[in-house]
Amino acid sequence: MYLKFFPAAAALIALSACSTLPSSGPTGSEIRSSAREAYDVGSGLQIEIISVESTDSLPPVIDMLDWDLPAGVVQPSDMVGPGDILNISIFEAGVSLFGGNMPAGAVGTGGFDPSVRVNTLPPSRVSDNGEIDIPYVGRLSVSGKTVGEIQDQIGAGLQDLSQSPQVLVSRQQVISNTVIIGGEIAQPGRLVLQTNDESITDVIALAGGYRGNLKDLMLRVQRAGAEANVRLSDILAGTYGDPRAFPGDRLTILLKPKMYSVLGASGRVQQMTFLRESMSVVEAISAAGGPASSSGDPESIFVFRFTGENKDEPVVYHFNMMRSETVFLAQRFALWDDDVVYFGNAAANQPRELIQTIGQLFGPIVTATAVANNLNN
């Protein structure tokens, strides 16, 4: 009696299981239909679907450079600014206003008047307002002036107070004519632009070079309230030319590897890093292990990405890897950072899962019945 019930029960369960069987993801046709319906159901996404079948279907090479920075100001390398610390020495002939000492080696050398005296003032920090204080002269505005101009400015202030004053100014500590570099760099800190003609690659080299794998590094440049984020490899390769570093720049090298996600009926489901600086879709498929032999469909491989100037336009590229021309095109199709590679589920996988489900449900009962029959015999 129980054996007669099995076929009918199996058929009933099979009919109910068809709509509830688990799968590793939608089939290719389901992906295409759902993409077309997305806008209609009010998601706000108008998804474009492109089948990669010819060179015309390859995406255009888009300028993805993110270098929207204002041009810096070219200035003399000895220009003084807020925060700089100045050494100031005043040389006087005859009666000294400051009562300084005779320069070393002055007597008997013929190089100096024996009556010349030198006075070295305490180090002077340029205030946030760009000013310094000089005894007997008062407060002077020096920001934006060169060392030579400041010497003349102090000398002019002392002209009526001292006999033939000569002023020597040097910078003990430079703050204004520097850049800050940090992150994945050998020697992070403040770096002085000695010539004011240093490029960003020069600054990186002077700071000891980058640390880590080049393909995984991002360079962030902050200037005058603006910010640019670019791949460090592009900077070193000259993609942007050889951009100059300007005083006040803040450079940060970040560990930010390019990533893509693998979903669906693949050999693995995870987020993966680029194997090298640039990868093709073929390389991404291979690194992911390809479609799963038991459930994946090589005719239904998709790349999901956002395109457009603001990366807000969704596009789905379809690859039928059973076609030889598509395989060649996939080798020329560049993968982007944050792409999603999706392996569609094979339609033939549903009957296979149905059989497996029936086997799991009735396997123990069939085994028990067989044992009972053997005992009765």
Image: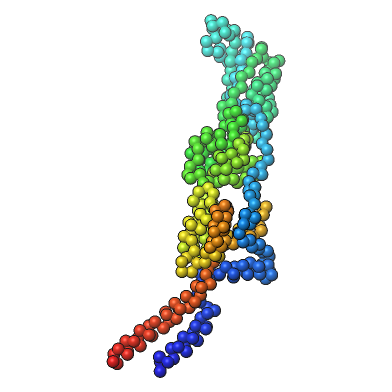
**Position of 257 relative to 172 (above/below):** below
Q: In which quarter of the image is the N terminus?
A: bottom left
Which residue lies at the image location 63% right of the left edge and 67% below the top edge? 35
267 and 319: which is toward the camera: 319
In-front residue for pair 87/296: 296
Residue shown at 57%/8% (left/top)? 111
Percent from the top left, x then y, of residue 241? 62, 38
As drawn, the residue found furthest toward the bottom would be 1
Give the vertical position of 168 relative to 266 (above or below): above
Residue 349, image x, y percentages: 50, 72
Instruction: Kindly tell me whether residue 85 is visible in this rendering.
Output: no
Which sits in the foreground, 41 or 122? 41
Q: Name the foreground residue: 2 vs 130.
A: 2
Residue 4 placement: quadrant = bottom left
Residue 219, position as x, y percentages in the image:
57, 44
Which residue: 63% across, 70% down?
33
Is 50 on the left or on the right of 189, as rendered?
right
Split into 4 quadrants, where in the image is the C terminus?
bottom left
Residue 113 in which image quadrant? top right
Q: Give the percent coordinates (x, y) of residue 286.
A: 48, 57
In the shown orientation, is residue 182 left or right of residue 76? Answer: left
The quadrant holding residue 340 is bottom right
Query: What is the basis of the colouring in this image?
Result: rainbow
Residue 161 at least partly seen: yes
Q: Looking at the picture, does residue 307 appear above or below residue 38? A: above
